[in-house]
Image: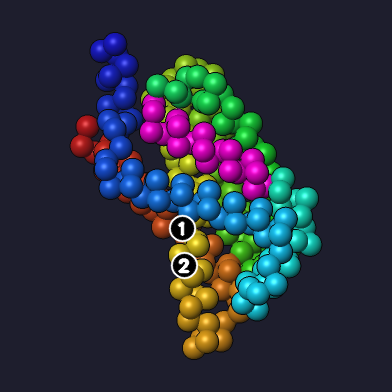
Amino acid sequence: MALRIDRAQSTGEQGIPLWLRIGFLGCTGIAIGVVLRRISALLNPSHVAPPQLAALDGFFASHTALTLSHIIPALVFVVLAAVVVLRPQTQSGIAGQVIYPLGAVVGITAYAMSVDSVGGWTERSAVLFFNSLFLYSMFRAWRYRVKSDEPLERRWLLRGVAILLGIATTRPVMGVFFATSPLTHLTPHQFFGIAFWIGFSINMLIFELWIRSRSRTT
């Protein structure tokens, strides 16, 4: 037991602070809401949506099968991630096992969706960069799981989850772009990629600053 505590301390894993839990739950809620809204839009298209939002709904409707194959596994992944992150004891259980193949599906389908992206190459480059980091983090976490190194598995799993939830952080950023579009005259094609880079960067930066600060204080 003492050895496991020492290993946990050496990886900077001594518990997630309240402010980070609140941010995590906020991102999780946004991600779930976005997926449910997208599924609803695919099944029951709105005829009264604003023009830009209607155009986006039409874009995803033209890729219904691929969109669903990405967002449904992503929804399950986010729910399982909430369980594993907030209840560390479940990391070694079924939730901790299922989250890895789900992560692989989410990552692979994200690559597929980026082939025809709303924001063109700016969005595509963000997906390629952060999605690759997500898959790499999940792979490292899985390798540590195979080695029964729970502290390092958790560290890399948290990193992967933080990166993936960057998609939720992009939504408020996009909201700002949508709200200011009458002044900036920017279209989703122009600002989607920028929003992706901002949202994912915020999540990755916050996580890295936190985990490295914990490492320095232990």
Residue 15 visible in the picture: yes
Q: Quadrant of the C terminus?
A: top left
Q: Are marks 2 and 1 in contact (CB under 8 Å)?
A: yes
- In the rendered image, residue 28 lying in the magenta stretch gets the answer no
Mark 2, residues whose alpha carbon is within 10 Å: few (<14), some, or many (≥20)? some
Q: Is 13 rendered above or below residue 56?
A: above
At numbered mark 2, what does the secondary structure look like: helix, strand or loop?
helix
Res. 15 mark: none
- In percent of width and height, residue 153 lies at 45, 27
Q: Residue at x 61, y 61 (%)?
A: 125
Q: Residue furthest left?
A: 217
- In percent of width and height, residue 38 lies at 64, 57
Q: Nearer the viewer, residue 40 or 158?
A: 40
Q: Residue at x 47, y 19 (%)?
A: 92
Q: Quadrant of the N terminus?
A: top left
Q: Label 2 is placed on what type of residue?
A: Val
For this view, does 214 lie left or right of residue 41? left
- In percent of width and height, residue 75 lies at 58, 43
User: Which residue is tagged 1?
Assistant: 169
- In the rendered image, residue 79 lying in the magenta stretch gets the answer yes
Res. 173 mark: 2
Q: Is 49 rendered above or below residue 212?
A: below
Q: Nearer the viewer, residue 76 or 127?
A: 76
Rendered image quadrant of residue 11: top left
- In percent of width and height, residue 17 lies at 27, 41
Q: Residue at x 79, y 62 (%)?
A: 62
Residue 156 visible in the picture: no
Alpha carbon separation for disc pair 2 and 1:
7 Å
Q: Which residues are magenta?
A: 70-88
Q: Label 1 is placed on what type of residue?
A: Thr
Q: Nearer the viewer, residue 129 or 35?
A: 35
